[in-house]
């Protein structure tokens, strides 16, 4: 694969000595959407959290192997984990807006970083909300509490909040699992636009969603990567019978 953004080699993850990911080898291309599919308990979310070391926060977490970004292993001892997590922004299944206004939700991270110029903050909020496909819906409501937004709008707000931190990668853990079809469509449309400037890794339990938006799809099962490839190929001619069985709904 050319233009590799993240290279995973021989990666294993353990919680209290129990393997949750085993022998993962995977290349993730820059400016593409990687969809990660598989049944519950297959290691999808654990792998996602391994990419920005959120698993470090859980007692008993241990890794082997490498995850390299631009040729550097993110598990090297001298890696700045705070900066790593800024570079790989994470959006979870349940949106959690801050108990502040829509504007303050987006500007919060920049203010923590020392940005005080009002014009600069306004431009950041506008740009981030626009990229997340939310600006037109909230541009006249920026002083309203973010919790007044609908569930789908709150999820796009959380995406915008990540974008305001200027990441290189967007990690999404089932971001549309609790949303209606219209909200899901809006987020998927935003992802298609965002991949022009970001590399996106999307964990989804909806195989149809992966088929719609992912350039490449990886199928996980019982902590192992069974296969990965271009989405159109994997969905029409999977190389492994287990992938075929999952896509046909025989299990999962």
Image (cartoon, helix red, strand yellow):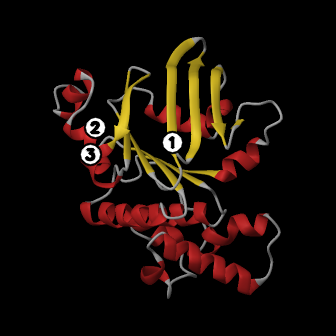
Q: Residue at x 50, y 85 (%)?
A: 139
Circle 2 Cα neighbour tier, 10 Å, few/some/many (<14 / 14–19 / ≥20): many
Q: How many marks?
A: 3
Residue under label 3:
232
Circle 1 Cα neighbour tier, 10 Å, few/some/many (<14 / 14–19 / ≥20): many
Q: Residue at x 45, y 27 (%)?
A: 43
Residue under label 1:
28
Disc 1 and disc 2: Cα gap in Å? 16 Å
> In this image, 136 relative to 205: left or right?
right
Q: Residue at x 39, y 68 (%)?
A: 150
Residue under label 2:
234
Looking at the image, the residue that sits furthest to the top is 17
Which is more toward the observer, 60 or 66? 66
Looking at the image, can residue 157 be seen?
yes
Looking at the image, can residue 219 be seen?
no
Q: Position of residue 210 (x, y in %)?
A: 32, 47
Disc 3 and disc 1: Cα gap in Å? 17 Å
Instruction: Please tell me whether residue 53 is drawn above or below residue 224 in the rendered image.
Output: below
Instruction: Please tell me whether residue 63 is drawn above or below residue 48 in the rendered image.
Output: above
> In this image, 106 relative to 117: left or right?
left
Mark 1 and 2 residues: CB-CB less than 8 Å, in contact?
Answer: no
Q: Position of residue 209 (x, y in %)?
A: 29, 50
Q: Residue at x 67, y 33 (%)?
A: 57
Under circle 1, the secondary element is strand
Mark 3 and 2 residues: CB-CB less than 8 Å, in contact?
Answer: yes
């Amino acid at each position: 694969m050319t233009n590799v953004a993240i290279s995973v080699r021989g990666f294993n993850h353990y919680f209290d000595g129990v393997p949750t990911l085993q022998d993962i080898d995977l290349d993730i291309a820059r400016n593409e959407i990687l969809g990660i599919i598989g049944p519950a308990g297959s290691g999808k979310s654990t792998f996602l959290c391994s990419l920005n070391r959120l698993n470090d926060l859980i007692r008993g977490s241990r890794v082997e192997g490498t995850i390299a970004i631009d040729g550097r292993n993110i598990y090297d001892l001298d890696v700045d984990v705070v900066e790593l997590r800024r570079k790989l922004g994470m959006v979870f299944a349940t949106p959690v807006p801050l108990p502040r206004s829509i504007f303050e939700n987006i500007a919060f991270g920049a203010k923590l970083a020392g940005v005080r110029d009002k014009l600069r903050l306004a431009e950041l909020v506008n740009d981030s909300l626009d990229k997340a496909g939310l600006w037109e819906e909230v541009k006249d409501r920026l002083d309203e509490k973010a919790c007044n937004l609908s569930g789908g709008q709150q999820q796009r707000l959380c995406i915008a909040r990540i974008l305001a931190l200027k990441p290189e990668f967007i990690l999404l853990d089932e971001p549309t699992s609790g949303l209606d079809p219209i909200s899901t469509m809006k987020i998927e449309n935003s992802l298609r636009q965002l991949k022009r400037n970001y590399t996106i890794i999307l964990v989804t339990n909806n195989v149809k969603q992966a088929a719609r938006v992912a350039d490449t799809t990886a199928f996980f099962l019982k902590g192992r990567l069974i296969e990965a490839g271009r989405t159109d190929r994997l969905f029409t001619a999977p190389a492994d019978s287990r992938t075929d069985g999952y896509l046909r709904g025989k299990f999962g």
